[in-house]
Image (cartoon, grey):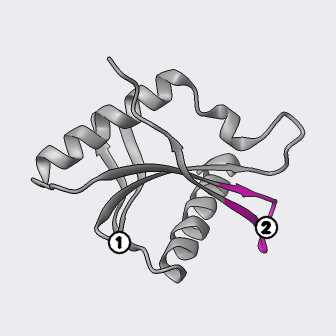
Amino acid sequence: MAEHNELGKEGEDEAAHYLTERGYHILHRNWRRGRNELDIVAAKDNQLVIVEVKTRRDEIYGHPEDAITNRKIRTLVSLADSYIKKFKLDLPVRFDIITVVGNEPPFRIEHIEEAFLPPIW
């Protein structure tokens, strides 16, 4: 596995641990539809939480959350819709971003709740 992929997986592991410690129930990790995936699907307070995880070694080239483009948002919303239909869920949905920065633990983690709303199509 490429080094950046290993860091990304470690970042997702840290994000999942962070969420679990805060009372989130992890439903799925790396849930796929075709070539696209939802990093973490969790539930808390009777709400479905879709979490996009962005891991970076540092912030020299900008903040990790800046990598979430409008195209990525549309993809995440479409995937969330597929997930809800597949599992026949009737819950409100929230889209969060967790950023993980550092080369090794302890990482700096930031949780951005309600990072974006689904666009109107």
Q: Which of 91 and 69 is in front in this view?
A: 91
Check the image and name the residue furthest to the right.
Answer: 60
How many residues crowd around disc 1 within 10 Å: few (fewer than 14), some, or many (20 or more)? few
Kindly identify the residue that appears in the image at 35 percent across and 22 percent down.
120
How many residues crowd around disc 2 within 10 Å: few (fewer than 14), some, or many (20 or more)? few
* Element type where label 1 sits in the image: loop
Q: Which of 71 and 3 is in front in this view?
A: 71
Residue 6 colored in magenta in the image? no
Kindly identify the residue that appears in the image at 45 percent across and 80 percent down.
23
Kindly identify which residue carries mark 1. 45
Q: Where residue 113 sits in the image (x, y, percent)?
A: 55, 55
Total count of labels: 2
- For residue 40, what is the image quadrant? bottom left
Residue 107 colored in magenta in the image? yes
Q: Where residue 16 sits in the image (x, y, percent)?
A: 51, 69
Check the image and name the residue furthest to the top.
Answer: 121
| Quadrant in which the C terminus is drawn | top left
Residue 68 located left or right of residue 34: right
Kindly identify the residue that appears in the image at 85 percent across and 49 percent down.
58
Frontmost of labels 2 and 1 is 1
Amino acid type, label 1: Asp
Marks 2 and 1 sit apart, C-alpha to C-alpha, by 31 Å
Is 43 above or below relative to 50? below
Kindly identify which residue carries mark 2. 104
Amino acid type, label 2: Glu
Say which mark, if any, is on residue 108.
Answer: none
In the rendered structure, which segment of residues is drawn in magenta? 99-110
Mark before the other along the chain sequence, 2 or 1: 1
